[in-house]
Amino acid sequence: MQISETKELLRQISLVDNRKITPDTIEAWHGIIGAIPFEIARSALKLAQQDASIKYLEPRNIIAWSKEAAFRLDRNKPKDEEVLIGSPMPVCKQHNAPIMICDLCCHSLYKFQEANGSSGLERFAQSEIYA
């Protein structure tokens, strides 16, 4: 977190409890909570302000709520769709059907493997059968 972000957190705190913010106060708070990312610290501040057991907010309260704040931010972050490479089952070029359902294609693959062994089977399937 930048020192300007620490200053912003202290400004938000002072709006609630009217504390006086000095450059020394900002520097002291930054020395304690400066390693926490700003988004997490801001969420931890909200959680700490909502905690009924906290009478006067201190840096340790931000630190104490940081783990929960990070967890909540991660949980609420939209998940990226899983990118699947290839298709679950190749599709036959000639019949536009899944390859394991197309008897003619399965027969072609079987005959090729029978005649040539397994070498080149994948290349043959990609060039002749898979869409």
Image (tube, grey):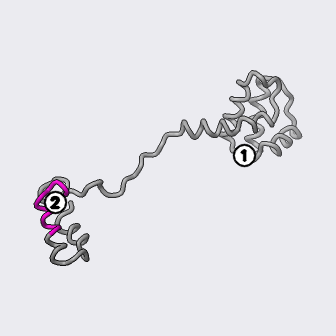
Amino acid, disc 2: Lys
Q: Quadrant for the C terminus, please.
A: bottom left
Query: Which amino acid, mark 1?
Result: Met
**Is 108 left, or right, of 44 in this rendering?**
left
Q: Residue extending furthest top?
A: 52
Q: Which residue lies under the disc numbered 2? A: 93
Is 57 located above or below residue 78 in the figure?
A: above
Name the residue: 19% across, 73% down.
113
Q: Is residue 119 left or right of residue 107?
A: right
Q: Residues within 10 Å of mark 2 (few under 14, many from 20)?
A: some
Image-quadrant location for residue 92: bottom left
**Structural distance between the alpha carbons of marks 1 and 2:** 56 Å
Q: Residue 86 magenta-drawn?
A: no
Foreground pick, 128 / 101: 101
Residue 13 occupies quadrant: top right
Q: Nearer the viewer, mark 1 or mark 2?
A: 2
Residue 1 — which label?
1
Residue at the image point whose x is 62% and y is 39% from the top = 71
**Residue 126 horizontal/vertical position (percent):** 23, 67
**Residue drawn at x 82%, y 32% as measured from the top left:** 58
For residue 11, side relative to residue 127 (left or right): right
Q: Is residue 18 above or below residue 71?
A: above
Instruction: Please tell me which residue lies in front, 96 or 14.
Output: 96
* Residue at 74%, 35% in the rendered image: 9
The residue stretch that appears in magenta: 100-110
Magenta segment, principal secondary structure? helix
Mark 1: few/some/many CA within 10 Å (<14, 14-19, 20+):
some
Where in the figure is residue 38, as x and y percent of width and height? 69, 41
| Secondary structure type for disc 1 | loop
